[in-house]
Amino acid sequence: MPNGKNCQKPPFCLKNESLKILFSDVIVMELLQKLSNANGPSGNEQEVRAIIEHEMRKFVDEVKTDKFGNLICHKKGKGPRVLLAAHMDEIGLMVKKITSEGHLKFALVGCIDPISLIGQRVTLLSQTKRVCNGVITSLDLHEDYPTTELPKIENMYIDIGLGKKEVQKIGVGIGTFAVPSHHFTFLGTERIISGKALDDRIGCYILIKLAEKLKQVSQDVFYVFTVQEEIGLYGAQTAVYQIDPDWAIAVDVTNAEDSESEDMMLGKGPAVTVMDAEMMSNQCINEWLTDIGKKNNIPVQYKVDEEGTTDAARLRLSKGGVPTTTVGVAIRNLHSTISVGHMDDIEHCIKLLYHLLKKPPRVCMV
């Protein structure tokens, strides 16, 4: 069970049986909590990579970090050469200016909805350590003026309570990263999770647990944990070229659409992407996933999206082309400082991929 201030205490009103379930789930999800709480904005994924490498060495034959920062884990075996990818990086901020008052003006690292930033606490990071905490504010909020319109990014800044000279003395400067300070927790039940960086630490968790289940299976599988997905899918583009797989799957999250409808709902199964803004998924792989879901009573949802994409958009373009699709889970509040997901979807996604990978077929062309 997690130690220290981040340990999640169950509600005292729960009955004994509920307490047993909750404590059990906390133990099972300790790794997911660790991944979510770790800091790893695009370009500074070291902390996350260290956690994943420690886990993956138990389940694969080779582990290496390439020159770009991707973690490539190879389970040697027979059959088609399969690549599974999940990105380690998260959205964040970067200091671009320090005003005379010590206010830290920032740029976005990845796509973040500005409305989710105001009033949030952040952790400032150097390349090697956590420097200090700060709060995102604006002039109106700072001075307690009435807010008449939504603040824009250019009007926000990070307040760490210091003047300009003091800011520089503690090691904060142009290029310092900042990430949200939210911690992994449960919401209404022990199956509903919330935390920062669920995009895509959920995918990283899925690959680790899948590697554990496939440890004794003699198939040729590459588990690739990529960098800099949030700013351009760069890690996937460099990693896939080294591997030259027969086919590939990006394991990522997608936006839930269940606020006012029953589309892409939490708790209704993993999501298979049919099309997104930059990719038409491989029909053959999607059909395999559909058949596996039906045969094993695993619920599956399907996504057609005209905005956004995943590492799959780069995986499929390597060398002569790689048949590729995206599988993942829906989360609420995607691309904000804190998101909401469902453990049922995560566990069903692991199960779906396990049944596919324990004896993977060779890919067809369409």
Image (cartoon, helix red, strand yellow):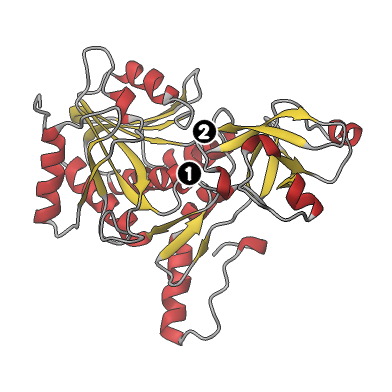
**Mark 1 surroundings within 10 Å by alpha-carbon count, few (fewer than 14), some (14 through 19), many (20 or more):** many
Give coordinates of residue 78: x percent, y percent.
18, 29
Q: Which residue is outermost to the top?
A: 319
Quadrant into which the N terminus falls: bottom right
Q: Is residue 196 above or below residue 96?
A: below
**Mark 2 surroundings within 10 Å by alpha-carbon count, few (fewer than 14), some (14 through 19), many (20 or more):** some
The quadrant in which residue 159 appears is: top right
In contact (CB < 8 Å): disc 2 and disc 1: yes
Which residue is identified by label 2? 110
The residue under the point 54% across, 57% down is 184
| 140 left or right, relative to 109 | right
Give coordinates of residue 343: x percent, y percent.
37, 60
As drawn, the label of residue 335 is 1
- The amino acid type found where label 2 is placed reads Gly
Q: Is residue 181 above or below residue 315?
A: below
Q: CA distance from mark 2 to mark 1?
A: 9 Å
